[in-house]
Image (spheres, rainbow, N blue to C red):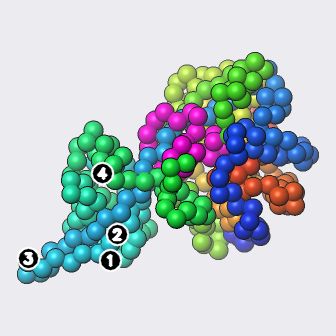
Amino acid sequence: MKTAEFDFDLPRELIAQRPAVPRESARLLDAQTGLLDRTVRDLADLLQPGDLMVFNDTRVIPALLSGRRIRAAVDGHDVIETKVSVTLHKPDGAGVWWAFAKPARRLQSGDRIEFGDDFAAEVVEKSDKGEILLRFDAKEVRFRDLLQRYGRSPLPPYIKRAQLPDDQDRSDYQTLFAERDGAVAAPTAGLHFTPELLAALAERGVSTAPLTLHVGAGTFLPVTVEEVERHEMHAETGEIPAATAAAVNATHARGGRVLAVGTTSLRLLESAVGDDGAVHPFDGDTSLFITPGYRFGAVDLLLTNFHLPRSTLYMLVCAFAGTDHIRAAYAHAIAQRYRFYSYGDAMLLKGADGRVQ
């Protein structure tokens, strides 16, 4: 497949800069079969008693750091300083993180990056993918405290601010479900939920279950290769509790449907499908890349925002609901002035071919 097949034109003014208020007032394109314009608060009416909604409970951490690189010269006396911006995206042990850096090309193993008088890290390694491995001086508990003090939430590059994030973003860019620290980007479909919407779902007879996928900064990276199959996904860490796996399997056994809130929930659930067709508890990394032709084994319905052109997430929704249907849905959304991306509106999709039984 060619990456160009997943391109489309989007008017810049449709990129949402703030979320809807209240959150469930965002528009919802009901694209299960046709294309119907609704709002997210209608979600309970679109589901059935006995359905299960699985959500991601990751919490966005202030993973964007600004510091200065310090490198001792050959004679051991002179010091070279360069401003560096670092975005943490995946832990690799206590106090050790993989990160993206700007300017990465100027960094070398052994360099020290100081983010504050009492907060610094050493560059341990540079990967051939442009990432750096950082070892922080601070132990885990103190590391979290210092990260809160010096870090900022790394909002997507298409959200424009004089300073990222501002005070409103600090609350807007967390979901109602956020409990477990670790994400550097929000699972944005979850941003639409409020206590009132959860109460309506419960009254409808829809049950809920959590999982955790710590979204990495790689989610913002475009697919740059010409052939889709040559793209390499960045691994993300996730966990599916035994109770959630059991709830998914029990829902399917009694004929109910599983709704994944967001592509993060869907990818992790699909990563946990065994050869027996059941979802199993999961604890580890996933780099599952879902493209058209993939056969789904865990998810029947998907609630998701509108995604970037040429992105792995747009490819995923094409795989789930059918490329022609998604093209039509996106064309409808653009014509009807839906708001796109992280703070934008949502769509509800039904799997095109049904799950693998």
Q: Tell me the distance, in whole angstroms, between the alpha carbons under discs 4 and 1.
A: 20 Å
Q: How far across and how far down the image is residue 62, in percent?
A: 42, 50
Q: Secondary structure at mark 2?
A: strand
Q: Which residue is mark 4?
A: 96
Q: Quadrant of residue 129?
A: bottom left
Nearer-the-camera pick, 217 or 335: 335
**Amino acid under disc 1:** Arg
Which numbered disc flags the more N-terminal residue, 4 or 2? 2
Where residue 295 appears, x then y in whole percent? Answer: 72, 45
Magenta span: 169-191
Q: Which mark is residue 248?
A: none
Relative placement, left or right, of 334 versus 150 is right
- Hey, what amino acid is under mark 3? Gly
The disc at residue 106 is 1
Q: Residue 65 appears at what percent x and percent y?
A: 37, 59
Circle 3 Cα neighbour tier, 10 Å, few/some/many (<14 / 14–19 / ≥20): few
* Kind of residue indicated by mark 4: Val
Q: Quadrant of the N terminus?
A: bottom right
Between the residue at mark 3 and the residue at mark 4, the CA separation in whole angstroms equals 26 Å
Q: How many marks?
A: 4
Q: Check whether the beta carbons of the residues at disc 2 and disc 1 lie within 8 A of each other.
A: yes
Residue 84, numbered label: 2
The residue depicted at 49 percent of the width and 33 percent of the height is: 179
Q: CA distance from mark 3 to mark 1?
A: 19 Å
